[in-house]
């Protein structure tokens, strides 16, 4: 059965007779909303300095500014260095050199102060003033505790603009799970609301699921990666956060577990009982700066995002009206695009979970896939004309090749009477990508070759 699910509705404006009631209602709603957030997401005195630091990262310093600060107390800021635009050629290398020199200079000053030298220059006096007790051991210890944080103001601002497309739907999803809608702001920390975000650890999407965690809640295979679908991954995030909360009982702990892992946070709570003590004392495993600061980052992002949302100069992206179709069989993207008259780029944008091998028709969309389309009158009309002849009962057939020493994609392609481009597409490999010994590559099933081999093997009487 082919079904369509509508995912966006137009809002209805209230009548003019309500206009006199709006100001007091807004005041009540704001007070209620603020109290609600404070109950669920308290800002403990133990983390106040960290929250202040992250608010400055999101709202004061942009990505051309590097903050060299103390890892334990981030409000101890030694200097702010000027970086070049990260989009310029070799920007990463140049910026690393800039920060390396600044770090080296600060470490030398701290070493001198630790050995009893009196501060002489303005910079030396400033750094000395950051440690009121002036204990030599504090200066020497601080040398190993310097950290760089690149400002995020410009990126955060763009993230708030992008969030307009998703934030309303995300709030509905969290409310449907009985969760605080403020959790919808977490992607500001994770991905800046960029749905195709990809980290060095291969965490992907709006909610930055790793493959291991993602597979517990989403489908990740050769055909789809649902981490990249904002709608599906938001449901997954809600489920994960709800499970965290049910076991850890407070949102500071549940949110920290989103970054650190639930099992690790349960161990931390067994040892230290409360979030505040975990924050101050826990230092096992991978509980380092990122995990320790995750909840503080969330509080800062929540406050700055809500402030920017009220800025009339900021024009947020608007939600896109779409509908979804549950596929009753395997289907070609090209055939569906042609049938519904949807452009290739629009189709890919609306269906970000589809792998390149599916989008380029090397493989078919899987049976049961929830295909997303623009919610237009023409699409609805075509939807009523959708028939079974557009679907296949099975996936495109393929075999496998185990990579041996000295083999390349082009050599393997020649061996199997196909093209390197086809193998790359089928295996979701970028052009000119490196393959490794023992890697299992999918190869298109060549019926003519199989038939020829069978014929050659036959004996004539």
Image: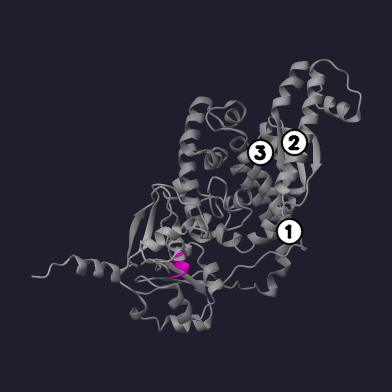
Mark 3 burial class by Cα count in 10 Å: few <14, some 14-19, many 20+: some
Magenta region: 357-361
Tell whether 389 sits left or right of 123. left
Principal SS element in the magenta part? helix
Residue located beneath label 1 in the image: 310
Q: Quadrant of residue 159?
A: bottom right
Q: Earlier in the sequence, mark 2 or mark 3?
A: 3
Q: Position of residue 12 (x, y in %)?
A: 61, 73
Q: Secondary structure at mark 3?
A: loop
- Residue 54 visible in this rendered orientation of the protein: yes
Residue located beneath label 3 in the image: 43
Along the viewing direction, whichever of 315 and 120 lies nearer the viewer: 120
Q: Magenta stretch: residue 359 in it? A: yes
Along the viewing direction, whichever of 23 and 155 lies nearer the viewer: 155
Question: In the drawing, what numbered circle is on residue 77?
Answer: none
Mark 1 burial class by Cα count in 10 Å: few <14, some 14-19, many 20+: few
């Amino acid at each position: 059965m082919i079904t369509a699910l509508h995912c966006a509705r137009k809002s209805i404006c209230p009548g003019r007779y309500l206009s006199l009631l709006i100001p007091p209602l807004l005041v009540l709603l704001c007070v209620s909303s603020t109290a609600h957030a404070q109950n669920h997401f308290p800002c403990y005195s133990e983390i106040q300095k960290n929250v202040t630091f992250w608010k400055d990262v999101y709202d004061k310093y942009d990505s051309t500014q590097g903050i060299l600060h103390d890892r334990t107390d981030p409000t101890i800021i030694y200097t702010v260095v000027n970086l070049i635009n990260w989009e310029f050629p070799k920007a990463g290398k140049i910026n690393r050199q800039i920060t390396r020199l600044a770090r080296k200079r600060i470490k030398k000053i701290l070493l001198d102060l630790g050995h009893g030298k009196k501060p002489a220059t303005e910079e030396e006096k400033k750094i000395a003033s950051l440690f009121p007790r002036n204990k030599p051991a504090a200066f020497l210890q601080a040398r190993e505790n310097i950290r760089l944080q690149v400002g995020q103001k410009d990126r955060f601002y763009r993230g708030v603009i992008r969030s307009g497309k998703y934030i309303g739907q995300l709030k509905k999803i969290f409310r449907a799970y009985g969760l605080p809608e403020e959790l919808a702001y977490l992607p500001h920390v994770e991905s800046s609301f960029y749905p195709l975000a990809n980290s060095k650890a291969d965490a992907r999407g709006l909610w930055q699921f790793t493959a291991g965690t993602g597979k517990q809640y989403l489908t990740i295979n050769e055909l789809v990666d649902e981490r990249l679908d904002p709608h599906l991954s938001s449901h997954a995030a809600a489920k994960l956060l709800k499970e965290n909360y049910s076991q850890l009982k407070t949102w500071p702990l549940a949110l920290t577990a989103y970054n650190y892992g639930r099992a690790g946070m349960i161990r931390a709570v067994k040892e230290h009982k409360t979030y505040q003590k975990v924050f101050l004392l826990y230092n096992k495993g991978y509980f380092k700066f990122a995990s320790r600061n995750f909840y503080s980052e969330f509080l800062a992002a929540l406050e700055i995002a809500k402030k920017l949302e009220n800025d009339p100069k900021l024009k947020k992206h608007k939600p896109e009206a779409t509908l979804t179709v549950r596929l009753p069989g395997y289907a070609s993207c090209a055939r569906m695009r042609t049938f519904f008259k949807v452009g290739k780029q629009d189709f890919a944008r609306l269906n970000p979970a589809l792998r390149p091998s599916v989008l380029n028709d090397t493989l078919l969309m899987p049976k049961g896939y929830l295909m997303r389309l623009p919610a237009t009158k023409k699409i609805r009309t075509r939807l009523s004309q959708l028939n079974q002849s557009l679907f296949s009962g099975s996936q495109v057939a393929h075999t496998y090749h185990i990579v041996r020493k000295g083999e390349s994609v082009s050599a393997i392609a020649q061996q199997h009477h196909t093209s390197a481009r086809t193998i790359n597409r089928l295996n979701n490999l970028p052009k000119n990508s490196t393959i490794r010994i023992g890697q299992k590559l999918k190869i298109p099933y060549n019926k003519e070759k199989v038939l020829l081999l069978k014929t050659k093997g036959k004996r004539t009487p």
